[in-house]
Amino acid sequence: MPAFDLPLAELERHRPEPAEPPDFDAFWRATLDGAASGDPLVSVREVATGLRLTRTWDVAFRGFAGDPVRAWYSRPAAIPTAEPLPAVVEYAGYGRGRGLPHTRLTWVNAGYAHLLMDNRGQGDQYGCGGDTPDPHASAPGGPGPAVRGLLAPHTYHYRRLVTDAVRAVAAVRALPGADAARTAAVGNSQGGGLALAVAGLVPDLAAVLVTAPFLCGIRRALDLTDASPYGEIAAYLSVHRGAEQAACRTLSYVEGISFARRAHAPAHFGVGLRDTVCPPSGAYAAFNRYAELSGADPRKEIRAYPFNGHEGGDAVHVRRQLDWLHAEWGTAPGPVSPRPA
């Protein structure tokens, strides 16, 4: 796919004003307050994985409406749980669930406590499945998560999923061996959009690492791409021809640029400039407006990959994320192998 979005020089200046609803903050305050009561943890059970160097627990925590949300919590086996480790909360991509506990080992192998959140009502499109149903997915909308309950903010799937993502931070902070003061949110694609939402809704988050984020610059993305998940929204509106205004109002409550404006934490972004799934102008808009309303002045960095699509920098970018977070928190292991240029 050739480059199709704005040239890099324009992306670096791209700062569209989001069409924020006037009650954006009140909406999310009420939503999160409704999910914040009680112990965040429902159950924690260590599981056998066949791995000798990693310990893993099957966790259930209270998400939206108190619903149990599943997650894998892992730590390096050689480090006693009495020793708190910086924690990374990771969010999976669109259509994925948490899969199996041995499939996501990068962050735990880097020496962090790692929580991988399941996506409620997802997990059937990629990977090895999920274990968290969505008991509230009965509002009008199409079969895909991007359009479930799309006609009203209170019934939209992403209201529930974003709430789960915020509660996952509370959950990891309640788990043994996690350093609550050093908690990062990490994700790619849909996971990147969730991590960015968490950055805007959790004021004491310590770091955020976002790659190819979904739900950023939503209106522009709907005009640029037919690829899923945006294509699912467009397909729904092609059938429900009078629903555009209601849908756009709903989407304005989950716009990543709005969350980015409210963030406080140091941030690392990654983007492929030929990404037709999550167009790069959305990531740049969120990056360029990052923290502008929070009163913070956090360190932030964005890495662009001019000839890559939705895969972005792939493993090269992951190594850059590791280097960045190690530097941010002073957690670099030794000896260190050469980093990518």
Image (cartoon, helix red, strand yellow):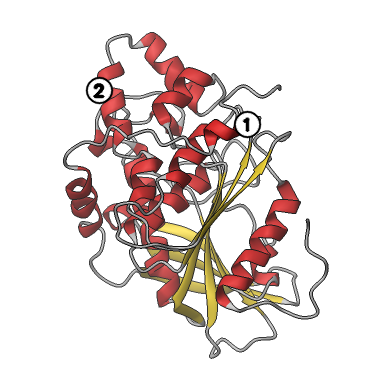
Above or below residue 241? Residue 253 is below
User: Where does residue 105 sit, x and y in percent of width and height?
Assistant: 69, 64
Q: Residue at x 46, y 35 (%)?
A: 14
Badge 2 element:
helix
Amino acid carrying label 2: it is Ala
Q: Tag 1, which secondary structure?
A: loop
Q: Is residue 261 visible?
A: yes
What residue is at 49 percent from the left and 65 percent from the top?
Answer: 184
Amino acid on which disc 1 is placed = Asp
- The quadrant in which the N terminus is found is top right
In the rendered structure, the answer to whether residue 78 lies left or right of residue 140 reads right
Residue bearing the label numbered 2: 246
Residue 280 vs residue 291: left or right?
right
Q: Position of residue 160 (x, y in %)?
A: 34, 46
**Which residue is located at x 75 percent, y 69 percent?**
50
Q: Which of the marked residues, 2 or 1, is nearer the chain's N terminus? A: 2
The answer to whether mark 2 and mark 1 are in CB contact below 8 A is: no
Q: Decide which of 63, 1 is in the foreground and name it.
A: 1
Foreground pick, 152 / 101? 152
Q: Which residue is mark 1?
A: 275
How far apart are the alpha carbons under marks 2 and 1? 27 Å
Question: Which residue is depicted at the point 60% across and 33% down?
Answer: 8
